[in-house]
Image (tube, rainbow, N blue to C red):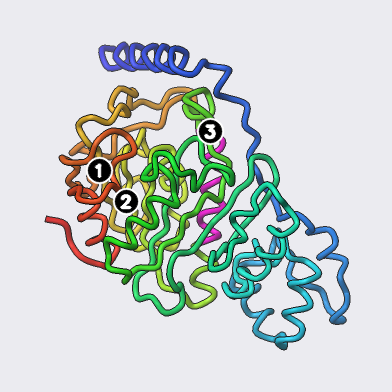
Amino acid sequence: MRRYRRTLVAIALMATLVSGTAGWAAGSGQRPVDGPPPGTAAWRHDGAFGRALPDPETAAPAQVAAFFATLSATQRQELTERHPSVVGNLDGVPVEIRYRANRLALAKDPRYSRLAAPGRQIVAFDPRGRGTVAEVYGDLLTSRHIAVVVPGSDIDAGTYDRSGDAYGTPAGMATSLRTATGGRTAVVAWAGYTTPVGVGLDAATGELAEVGAERLARFTEGLAAVGAGTPKLFCHSYGSVVCGLAASEAAASDIVVLGSPGMRADTVDALRTDARVWAAKDPSDWISKVPNVEFLGLGHGADPAAADFGARRVPARTAHGHTGYFAPGTDSLRAFASIATGGEVR
């Protein structure tokens, strides 16, 4: 009974926190981008090669990779030019082809022209809703180590590389991590799902994370299908909810959560993953004020940084605030670089 009362008190505190910071309704109502990419209908009806193309909704990344392996360079180019939005977002397509396809898709959308700048490697781009995007820093196929950064709230195609709060954006986290590893790690800034806006109902529930988890797991399968290495996932804030739900399906060697409100699991064992699980929380992070409960779909469960959760602890004494974990010179960034390159943290 005492534990039940504590849970009810925690729920009340969460409701007060959410309503007092962003508004229970004001921060909710995001509709997740889901399903196959734009242009799928035309792709499905394309019979130019005399055979069906892999269905973007049902074909596994390995099947997509096998299909593209049968195409000539000319056929690949034709498909890319006719269906850039499908090719650019289809997990299992060789990454260089995806980069080319997304450059074509971005050229048609002036809202995101900066993403089409020379040298940028956009491995996914979907303009629907607030827009989703993923960018690669480094070479996925030749790098020995690969990391994927999964962001939290208020990130979309328009804000994922904003200049303010650099280490709170997936682009800033990715570039900082790559620099900290001396360029030995290819890093993907993966803003590939619809994130919550503000600290409202969407951030307190798992609906957006559930869709994001499916997309993240498929993305990691796509990396394996094209011959890239097994990635380490670095999951910030609400992104750790995504990673928690994806843990049992994602192809990852390590899952690192930072500033996490919970992973929708009570312990590491409940994640049902063989990956090493790590957690970081700095003393000044406001996320500590969020109650670690899950009740009737509200809240995300146990604190991954708590000792009884069972995660390996990442030092974060010199990180500051909710978005300071990737700041240069911090103990957390040094630890992340060690994990990214396959090392231990002491």
Q: Which residue is nearer to you in this view: 210 or 339?
A: 339
Which residue is label 3 attached to? 196
x and y percent of residue 258 in the render?
31, 43
Residue drawn at point x = 32 percent, y = 58 percent: 177
Quadrant assignment for the N terminus: top left
Q: Which secondary structure is most common in the magenta stretch?
A: helix
**CA gap, disc 2 and disc 3:** 20 Å
| Three-letter amino acid code of the residue under disc 2 | Val
Query: Along the horizontal axis of the image, is 178 left or right of 346?
Result: right
Which label belongs to residue 296? none
Query: Along the horizontal axis of the image, is 45 left or right of 165?
Result: right
200 is higher (above) or lower (below) than 337: above
Which residue is label 1 attached to? 280
Discs 1, 2 touching: Cβ within 8 Å: yes
Residue drawn at point x = 66 percent, y = 64 percent: 103
Secondary structure category for the residue under label 3 = loop
| Three-letter amino acid code of the residue under disc 1 | Ala
Residue drawn at point x = 53 percent, y = 42 percent: 159
Query: Along the horizontal axis of the image, is 314 left or right of 40?
Result: left
x and y percent of residue 163 in the render?
45, 44
**CA gap, disc 3 and disc 1:** 21 Å
User: Closer to the observer: label 2 or label 3?
Assistant: 3
Q: Earlier in the sequence, mark 3 or mark 1?
A: 3
Segment colored magenta:
206-219
Q: Earlier in the sequence, mark 1 or mark 2?
A: 2
Secondary structure category for the residue under label 2 = strand
Which label belongs to residue 256? 2
